[in-house]
Image (tube, helix red, strand yellow):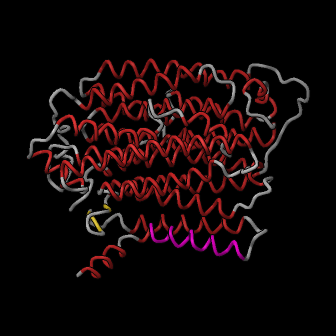
Amino acid sequence: MLTQQILDGLSKFYPETILSVTILVIVFVELFFKKKTRVSGWIAMAGLAAAMLFTFLQVNIPAQTIFFQMVAVDPFSYFFKVLLILSGFLIVLFTFLSDEIRSSEFKTQEYYALLIALTLGGFLMASSVNLLMMYLALELSSLSSYVLAGYFKKSNRSSEAALKYVIYGGVSSGLMLFGISLIYGICGSLDMFAISAYLSANPVNLITLLIAIFLMLAGFGYKISAVPFHFWTPDVYEGSPMPVTALLSVSSKAAGFAMLIRFFLVAFQNAGHPTITTEGLHQYITLPGLHWPEVIAVIAVATMTLGNVVAIWQDNLKRLLAYSSIAQAGYMLLAFVVVSPQGISAMLTYLAVYLFMNLGAFFAAILISNKYKTENIEEMKGIGYRSPLLCVSMAVFMLSLSGIPMTAGFIGKFYIFSALINNGYIWLAIIGLMNSVVSLYYYIKILKNMFLIRPQGDTGAVSFGAGYSVLLLALAIPTIVLGIFFGPLTKFAEYSVQIFGLK
């Protein structure tokens, strides 16, 4: 019986198995192709493509848990697997085209193995329905991130970024583990469905439970860069290699939100039943003196406000995008205040469009770094005249991040604000809208330097290869198209929150 359950689980664990095999293949290939660094990159892309194929083949499988109720196979996990694979695939391409990586004296084979390991950790974070599995998945993702952040060992900036990341990550991870131990002590189980059933039916020590939940929030908040667990973000984003920064800004954040949603909407729902359907999303378990929507609303407002205000003063493009990423996490948390399928599907929609516009912004930053050898915004004066395709694409990404109509970012924010207004949080939607207006200032500052100031010195046109242009357009076009034809994306998001798992 035990063997049969494991075999049944493995038959539904193909995407994760493929990624695990890909990591091993890359490690072994390093022994034979030490100087042909792109071999590992092509293997990584093949592994991601195969994982995507098997993810699509699982779509019609009934939602269920495998490996003794440790991992869920359901539409919710499919959504995040698709996002993580797309992100990983694009980051491999970014790496191919980054002078920062190509000019490095260090081998890149380990880089691709770590990239796939981080993606695998994100898969497991999105699928975990057991607190122990959740913690192990978080550690797999985090440990890979630490090494990638400090990948350039001889760079003081990269080493500093990795050290800060390890310190903040270690503290957050320890706090989260302590919170898990308290929840286990209260409920006698690490299974989220069992925790939900116990909390719905039994009185508990309120203070201990609150401490446990806030300790858990430390782990979630660190992963999504929410205030007050955001301190690592600017330094790590600035010091890490540009493709790694792009990876952390999307993959790591998406996996963190998946874990946050899974935890609160399964373990802390009134349903107390292994099936969480659209009809079962009622409200958070009521605890005397504490209302979760208000707590999350405060965190969301603090996160987006701090990110937007501090971004105004930045003159380094990577640090500006880091604070922008913090603010974007605040917008996504706004949707989490609404305990309904509309709120969660709005968050998923925003995560999907965020992938294109944020990765697009980072890819444009990579190209600027390649050709103009700068990350300083003031040194980008007039490059719109020299590289129009690059700077027009950057304008699309910046305007989308700020939520201007006819862009994908507008649709994402529209759905979030609509969910808030429909559920009575008009004041919260107004604060979110005001923050979007503030964000326009620092996004427009980049475009002002590119287009409104004449270039100094060399004014010749700077061209990029066809590969660079194609990838840039592959990110810019969806950012516009999804702002107009967004129906299929929103339907996919709505489908993904219909059910979180069966026991």
**Left or right side of 135 for 243:** right
What's the magenta region? 16-31
Q: Is residue 373 above or below residue 26?
A: above
Query: Toward the viewer: 370 or 493?
Result: 370
Q: Position of residue 136 (x, y in %)?
A: 41, 58
Q: Main secondary structure of the magenta part?
A: helix
Would you say residue 346 is visible in this rendering? Answer: yes
Quadrant of the frame with the C terminus: bottom left
Which of the two residues, 185 or 147, is positioned nearer the viewer here? 185
- Asked whether 136 or 355 is in front, the reply is 136
Residue in the picture at 48% in, 33% down: 328
Q: Is residue 106 above or below residue 442?
A: below
Give the residue displayed 48% in from the left and 46% down from the top: 170
- 163 up-or-down from 438: above or below: below
Q: Vertically, is 488 above or below 443?
A: below
What residue lies at 52% left-to-right and 45% top-to-bottom?
Answer: 250
Q: Is residue 5 within the magenta segment?
A: no
Q: How many marks?
A: 0
**348 with respect to 190 (left or right):** right
Horizontal arrangement in the rendering, residue 300 relative to residue 290 (left or right): right
Indicate the position of residue 55 as horizontal and vertical percent values. Answer: 42, 64
Quadrant into which the N terminus falls: bottom left
- Residue 108 is drawn in which quadrant? bottom right
Q: Is residue 26 magenta?
A: yes
Q: Position of residue 350 (x, y in %)?
A: 43, 39
Residue 266 visible in the picture: no
Q: Residue 161 vs residue 194: left or right?
A: right
Q: Residue furthest right?
A: 457
